[in-house]
Image: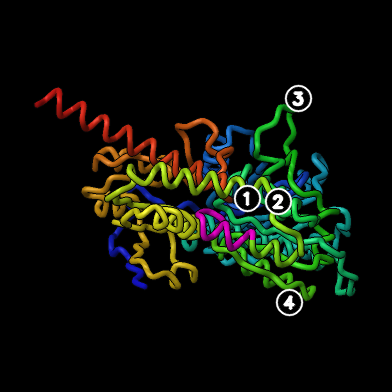
């Protein structure tokens, strides 16, 4: 394992996305929730704009709209006013207060101020949680994971330390930030097909999957209700998808004695086999025939595509968990990994055998010279064009393609979709190169 840190005075075409956006994304998977970003108005505008453009849905988020004088004199006054307004006007089930670099650097004890606010208001029906997510460390993935862990802590505080009898065949699902809304739905359906009851936290499959509802709501319109989330403490098992979800899973184990299993991803033949074998062993039920047939489809699709992947090299620039998941199916297709770039360093990357750079999309472009395939978010498209690589948009944000948030990337069916999608881009690239050589020959 080699992790390289780029030594540059600034980031060019950044890959990293701020932690507060990850916290906002996590709260979108809780029913009737409302994130409040405690910081400057621009911090909230940035997160809301990117999320809205990626998911093409209205995103629930508010801000304390701090300015310089607010930070100097009393930043928490804005926070209390925002909480009073939100609770009186919208009556959310869950409020998540997310700090930014501005409030963290100022040293304000906003968490203590919120606890005092909770005692004064005697909030019982509303879950009010705080999460420190400064932009100067971590990335979207770490912000998302920290927000999930804070939500679990808030639910535990509400529930108390009473021991509860486990519910037979009930499992928790902690989906990572890199999974699409359709991925979460597919995982829920797959687990349920083994006769298990599933509670997902957060559950973006019902909030960010695209739905037609009349009227405007400042709160999230889908996601897991808090009543269901509180039942997580009675589950027999927690399944975490992505290494960033191990901390929330461990929190459930320490507080409620629930064992957990972490999967780095469920993309690729080997990863999908591992996931289905585990479900079969845990449930005592055989793998349903439709998944066996999907596995046959995947094997046939891999055979069909292997000519187009022969000798192909790729550069991948994504969030850490997503990077690990994508690398698994690329290696199964025999793709040479010319460059791997992640937004931040995590323990999951330290366990990898490949050489990984912590950097930006400029570093990806430097590594991609001569590469055939480029996989990153939409901001990497120009770099792929400069290098002459086929561009495949994945991760966050995807701004210039329809349905990115609805694409399936997990299981046998999702892996086949990924292989065909990348393969088609390689075919188009080869055709374009041939056409240019004929025109200029």
Between residue 315 and residue 363, name the one nearer to us: 315
Residue 61 in the image: above or below residue 68:
above
Identify the mark at residue 288; answer none if there is no mark. Answer: 2
Marks 1/2 in contact by CB < 8 Å: the verdict is yes
What range is drawn magenta here?
A: 266-276
Residue depicted at 65% across the width and 68% down the height: 261
Q: In the image, is 222 to the left or to the right of 337? A: right
Between residue 162 and residue 403, name the one nearer to us: 403
Q: Provide the residue designation for mark 3.
A: 214
Q: Choose the circle earlier in sequence order: 3 or 4.
A: 3
CA separation in Å, label 4 and label 2: 33 Å
Q: Is residue 103 visible?
A: no
Indicate the position of residue 144 as horizontal and vertical percent values: 60, 56
Q: In the image, is 434 to the left or to the right of 44? A: left
Marks 3/2 in contact by CB < 8 Å: the verdict is no
Q: Provide the residue designation for mark 4.
A: 254
Q: In the image, is 352 to the left or to the right of 125? A: left
Q: Choose the circle earlier in sequence order: 3 or 1.
A: 3
Marks 3/4 in contact by CB < 8 Å: the verdict is no
Q: Is residue 208 magenta?
A: no
Q: Secondary structure at mark 3?
A: loop
Q: Provide the residue designation for mark 1.
A: 292
Identify the mark at residue 123; answer none if there is no mark. Answer: none
Indicate the position of residue 63 as horizontal and vertical percent values: 63, 46
On the rendered image, what quadrant is the N terminus found in? bottom left
């Amino acid at each position: 394992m080699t992790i390289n840190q780029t030594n540059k005075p600034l980031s060019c075409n950044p890959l990293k996305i701020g932690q507060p956006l990850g916290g906002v994304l996590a709260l979108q998977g809780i029913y009737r929730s409302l994130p409040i970003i405690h910081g400057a108005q621009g911090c909230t505008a940035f997160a809301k704009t990117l999320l809205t453009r990626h998911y093409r849905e209205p995103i629930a988020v508010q801000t304390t709209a701090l300015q310089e004088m607010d930070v100097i004199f009393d930043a928490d006054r804005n926070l209390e006013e925002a909480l009073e307004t939100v609770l009186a006007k919208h009556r959310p089930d869950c409020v998540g207060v997310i700090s930014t670099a501005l409030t963290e650097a100022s040293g304000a004890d906003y968490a203590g101020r919120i606890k005092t606010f909770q005692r004064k208001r005697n909030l019982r029906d509303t879950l009010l949680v705080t999460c420190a997510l400064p932009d100067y460390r971590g990335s979207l993935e770490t912000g998302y994971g920290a927000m999930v862990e804070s939500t679990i802590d808030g639910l535990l505080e509400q529930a108390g330390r009473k021991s509860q009898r486990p519910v037979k065949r009930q499992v928790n699902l902690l989906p990572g930030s890199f999974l699409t809304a359709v991925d979460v739905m597919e995982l829920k359906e797959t687990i349920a097909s083994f006769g298990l009851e599933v509670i997902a936290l957060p559950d973006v499959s019902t909030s960010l999957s695209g739905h037609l509802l009349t009227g405007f709501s400042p709160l999230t319109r889908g996601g897991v209700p808090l009543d269901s989330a509180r039942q997580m403490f009675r589950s027999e098992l927690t399944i975490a998808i992505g290494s960033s979800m191990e901390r929330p899973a461990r929190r459930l184990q320490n507080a409620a004695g629930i064992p957990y299993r972490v999967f780095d991803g469920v993309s690729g033949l080997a990863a999908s086999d591992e996931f289905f074998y585990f479900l079969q062993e845990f449930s005592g039920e055989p793998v349903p025939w439709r998944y066996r047939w999907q596995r046959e489809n995947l094997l046939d699709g891999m055979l069909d595509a292997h000519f187009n992947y022969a000798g192909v090299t790729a550069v991948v620039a994504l969030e850490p968990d997503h990077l690990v998941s994508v690398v698994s199916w690329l290696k199964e297709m025999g793709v040479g990994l010319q460059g791997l770039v992640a937004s931040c360093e995590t323990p999951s990357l330290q366990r990898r055998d490949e050489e990984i750079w912590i950097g930006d999309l400029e570093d990806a472009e430097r590594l991609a010279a001569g590469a055939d395939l480029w996989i990153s978010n939409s901001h990497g498209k120009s770099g792929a064009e400069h290098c002459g690589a086929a561009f495949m948009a994945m991760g966050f944000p995807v701004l210039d393609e329809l349905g990115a948030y609805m694409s399936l990337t997990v299981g046998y069916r999702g892996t086949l979709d990924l292989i065909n999608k990348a393969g088609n881009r390689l075919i188009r690239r080869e055709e374009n190169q041939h056409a240019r050589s004929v025109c200029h020959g």
